[in-house]
């Protein structure tokens, strides 16, 4: 059995989600190859060859792959599919966008967002926003899988020495064009792989207060900043801060939920965190049911105090 | 311009769901059912395009039990013109849904398909991308903004690193994210009017698509429960616990 992992990268660096996906792949078989498809991607390729546990790096270079358009990338993956029993990608917006396209072209029912590998055919995955865990067995000959990266440790990004092989890339789908990327730039750790996440909700009240209270607290702790959907909807923060069923899944060592009520959809994205702290003025807020340490208090008084005493 | 909007009947997002004690499935007997929230957003977007004079007809389509007719009527009350219902009690997987949708796309020839990014029951997030692949159409997933310009669409997508804008040629597929719009509440007269809008029913045999599942559900369990923690009385106590008990800061 050989397994193909699709690397998520921005041509310069390999994203941490890829490293967790490799761990999931290695639970099925150790012969794991990594596809790096992109354009002008020396940086990503150099990192790829270094990753521990990769047997071979496949390089697919084409200008049509610069922005990972699903129409082009799926074609490249399908051209390689014959050689592999399993094809895995992270269940990030990158993997979610491209992998179902691959699955349909191969007439395969994708297994989305796995949280555990039982064996090569059998996987666990959350359903109903994580309110239940289904164990599913696939009867397809080839498995197309996306992986919830928070449920698998990252492999070491160093120590490997994989040879790189170039593959032909057909990437000329002409009905989709990349126009622009409005990148959310931040010097903080990346949300899905940060050790500490400080999240604010509707209770924070405004974008201004988010900047004054949540962000400095995060910076003091060296944390990433997250948010509830309500905070995103209200425009306090950009969309890619959203933690939850339909946002990002996080599982840091410490998650602080500030002014967040704890709706099912929010819990779905953070309840696998190691330690959860909740600050909320409503003692009946559902967030307290999952919080290891709950503080019933006004965030406008307690967050400044916390910051000062840290 | 003709727009097709596939919608799914799902457990309402406010309902707490549990696994059955025998672990065979989730227990959803007698719970409130709704249009999948993302699909409601898709219907709303289609209706706004029609109101802006950019579309003439909106067809909503569902594959689901007899009662899924309720969700088609809801969509027609929001403003869809007619409904297509493939009646089945099976739990149809995304690949089969996509194949069934393809059948109707070939028949109806829509210029645009708007659908949800994810059904909140199975949480697959697959069907739109699969349908695009089967049709050889461009896709713009997780849309937070859609602008139609004749035979193409500019779509802004919510992705992990920020916002990406793509231009897709039509016919094409767009899947919706939560911020695309806020669906309206249907007014009573519209609900009454919706009851009279045309609705065609089909059986799976009529469309010749095999609904056999590829994924066998071996069991369904409740997730591990978190042990409820403690309430702390002050910031000093919280800091002490985090430093000395949990050792996370
Ligand atoms: C299809 C769908 C998908 C969704 N996906 C997501 C998702 O991925 N992620 C997500 O987060 N949500 C999601 N939601 C929304 C979710 O249902 C909730 O509406 C949302 O999580 C609520 O956010 P909140 O807790 O910030 O706001 P609220 O529920 O309004 O809670 C605000 C909290 O702040 C507290 N508060 C107010 N003032 C103060 C103060 N001064 N001091 C301390 N506490 C205070 C209040 O007591 C309250 O508990 C989704 C909804 C739908 C329909
Ligand atoms: N049974 C169904 N009938 C009609 N549309 C569906 C059905 N299942 C899924 N869809 C559509 O596909 C989208 C994505 O669903 P999924 O891939 O299951 O997460 C949904 O938001 C719907 O628009």
Image (cartoon, rainbow, N blue to C red):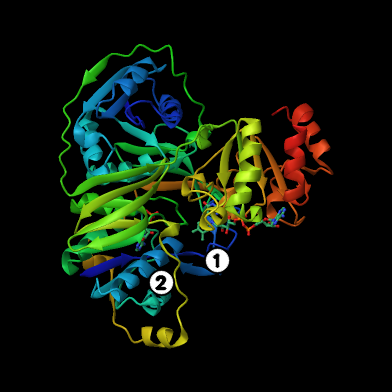
Instruction: Please indicate, yes or no, whether residue B19 appears anywhere in the rendered image.
Output: no
The residue lying toward the viewer, choosing from A280 and B84, is A280
* Comes first in the chain, label 1 or label 2: 1
Residue at position x 42%, y 64% in the image: B181
Decide if residue A160 is on the left or right side of residue B99.
Answer: right
Q: Mark 1 points at which residue?
A: B29
Give me the chain letter of mark 2. B
Indicate yes or no: mark 2 CB to ligand 2 under 8 Å. yes
The residue lying toward the viewer, choosing from B97 and A51, is A51
Q: In which quadrant will I find the C terminus of chain B?
A: top right
Looking at the rendered structure, which numbered label has been put on residue B122? none
Instruction: Please indicate, yes or no, whether residue B58 appears anywhere in the rendered image.
Output: yes
Task: Please determine whether, in this image, residue A83 is positioned above or below residue B39.
Answer: above
Q: How many labels does the image show?
A: 2
Task: Please determine whether, in this image, residue B16 is positioned above or below residue B188.
Answer: above
Q: Mark 2 points at which residue?
A: B68
Disc 1 versus disc 2: distance between alpha carbons? 15 Å
Which of the 4 image quarters holds residue A57?
A: top left
Secondary structure of residue under mark 1: loop
Residue at position x 55%, y 39% in the image: A250
Residue B57 at x, y percent in the picture? 24, 75
Secondary structure of residue under mark 2: helix
Q: In which quarter of the image is ligand 1?
A: bottom right
Residue A234 at x, y percent in the picture? 54, 58
The residue lying toward the viewer, choosing from B182 and B52, is B52
Which of the 4 image quarters holds residue A162?
A: top left
- Answer few, some or many: residues within 10 Å of disc 2's Cα (few below 14, many 20 plus, some between 14 and 19): many
Q: In which quadrant will I find the N terminus of chain B?
A: bottom left
Residue A305 at x, y percent in the picture? 77, 40
Residue A282 at x, y percent in the picture? 75, 57
Question: Quick check: do tags 1 and 2 share a chain?
Answer: yes
């Amino acid at each position: 059995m050989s397994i193909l992992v699709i690397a998520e990268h921005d041509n310069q660096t390999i994203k941490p989600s890829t490293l967790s996906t490799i761990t999931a792949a290695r639970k099925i078989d150790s012969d794991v190859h990594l596809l790096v498809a992109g354009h002008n991607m020396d940086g990503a390729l150099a990192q790829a060859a270094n990753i521990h546990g990769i047997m071979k790096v496949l390089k697919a270079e084409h200008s049509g792959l610069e922005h990972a358009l699903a129409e082009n990338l799926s074609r490249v993956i399908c051209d390689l599919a014959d050689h592999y029993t399993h094809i895995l990608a992270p269940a990030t917006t990158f993997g979610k966008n491209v992998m179902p396209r691959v699955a349909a072209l191969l007439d395969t029912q994708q297994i989305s967002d796995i949280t555990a590998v039982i064996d090569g055919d059998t996987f666990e995955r959350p359903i109903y926003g994580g309110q239940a865990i289904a164990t599913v067995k696939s009867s397809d000959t080839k498995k197309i899988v996306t992986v919830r990266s928070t449920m698998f440790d990252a492999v070491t990004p160093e120590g490997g020495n994989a040879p790189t092989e170039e593959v032909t890339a057909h990437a000329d789908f002409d009905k989709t064009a990349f126009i622009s990327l409005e990148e959310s730039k931040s010097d903080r750790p990346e949300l899905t792989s940060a050790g500490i996440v400080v999240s604010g909700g509707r209770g924070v009240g405004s974008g201004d207060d988010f900047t004054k209270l949540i962000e400095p607290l995060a910076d003091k702790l060296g944390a990433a900043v997250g948010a509830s959907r309500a905070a995103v909807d209200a425009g306090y923060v950009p969309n890619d801060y959203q933690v939850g069923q339909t946002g990002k899944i996080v599982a840091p060592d410490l998650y602080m939920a500030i002014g967040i009520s704890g709706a099912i959809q929010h819990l779905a994205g953070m309840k696998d965190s190691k330690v959860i702290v909740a600050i909320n003025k409503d003692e009946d807020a559902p967030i307290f049911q999952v919080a290891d340490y709950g503080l019933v208090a006004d965030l406008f008084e307690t967050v400044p105090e916390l910051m000062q005493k840290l | 311009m003709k727009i097709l909007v596939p919608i799914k009947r799902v457990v309402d997002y406010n309902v707490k769901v549990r696994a059955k004690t025998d672990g065979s499935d989730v227990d959803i007997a007698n719970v409130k059912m709704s249009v999948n929230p993302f699909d409601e957003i898709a219907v709303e977007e289609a209706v706004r395009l029609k109101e802006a004079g950019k579309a003439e007809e909106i067809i909503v389509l569902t594959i689901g039990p007899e009662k899924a007719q309720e969700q088609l009527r809801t969509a027609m009350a929001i403003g869809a013109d007619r409904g297509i219902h493939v009646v089945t009690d099976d739990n149809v997987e995304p690949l089969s849904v996509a194949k069934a949708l393809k059948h109707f796309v070939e028949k109806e020839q829509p210029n645009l398909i708007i659908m949800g990014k994810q059904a909140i029951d199975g949480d697959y997030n697959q069907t739109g991308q699969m349908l695009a692949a089967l049709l050889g159409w461009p896709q713009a997933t997780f849309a937070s903004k859609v602008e139609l310009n004749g035979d193409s669409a500019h779509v802004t997508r919510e992705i992990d690193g920020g916002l990406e804008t793509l231009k897709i040629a039509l016919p094409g597929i767009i899947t919706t994210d939560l911020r695309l719009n806020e669906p309206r509440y249907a007014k009573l007269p519209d609900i009454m009017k919706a009851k009279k809008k045309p609705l065609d029913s089909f059986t799976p045999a009529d469309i010749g698509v095999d609904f056999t599942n590829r994924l066998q559900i071996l069991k369904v369990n409740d997730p591990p429960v978190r042990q409820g923690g403690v309430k702390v009385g002050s910031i000093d106590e919280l800091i002490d616990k985090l430093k000395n008990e949990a050792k996370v800061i």
